[in-house]
Amino acid sequence: MVETIDVPAKDRFQLITEHDPEDFIYDREFLGIARSRDLVIIQITLAAGRSLQLKRSLYRTIAERLGTAAGLRPEDVLINLVEVARENWSFGNGIASYAPEEAAAA
């Protein structure tokens, strides 16, 4: 799916958590979408700037692939994108990985 939203190769860091039913609270009919107990919530943090068209393609691709691979209904795929400015990333070594060099000198 990284190719769908134009993410650099190998830029994949994932955190997967599972919750007991009593710790997983959600509205089963929010916005008129009938959700089951199979709901999966996906939150993706990414650099700001992708077009609405790319985002829609990503949502569709994720829902389709989860349907094919895991038999998940599209109604049970909730996706949230969190966009941040490029200078807000440090992938290690205590440096702003995507910040321009002239900004580092300031």
Image (tube, helix red, strand yellow):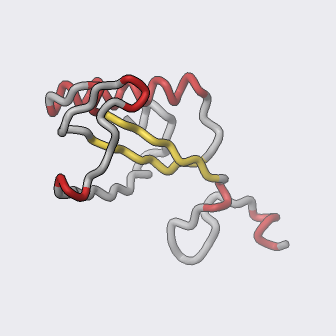
Q: Quadrant of the N terminus?
A: top left
So how many labels did they put on this image?
0
Question: Residue 71: image x %, image y %?
Answer: 14, 28
Viewer-proximal residue among 65 and 102: 65
On the image, which quarter does residue 88 sit in? Answer: bottom right
Given the current orientation, which residue lies at the most extreme right position?
Answer: 106
Q: Quadrant of the C terminus?
A: bottom right
Please give left or right for residue 70 compared with residue 86 in the image: left
Question: Residue 18: image x %, image y %?
Answer: 21, 56
* 56 in relation to 48, above or below: above
On the image, which quarter does residue 102 sit in? Answer: bottom right
Q: Residue at x 56, y 22 (%)?
A: 53
Question: Residue 43: image x %, image y %?
Answer: 41, 47
* 31 in relation to 47, above or below: above
Q: Residue at x 27, y 41 (%)?
A: 40
Q: Residue at x 20, y 56 (%)?
A: 22
Please give left or right for residue 67 compared with residue 29 in the image: left
Please give left or right for residue 99 compared with residue 94 in the image: right
On the image, which quarter does residue 32 sit in? Answer: top left
Please give left or right for residue 70 compared with residue 80 in the image: left
* 31 in relation to 94, above or below: above
Viewer-proximal residue among 5 and 83: 83
Q: Residue at x 18, y 39 (%)?
A: 37
Question: Residue 17: image x %, image y %?
Answer: 26, 58
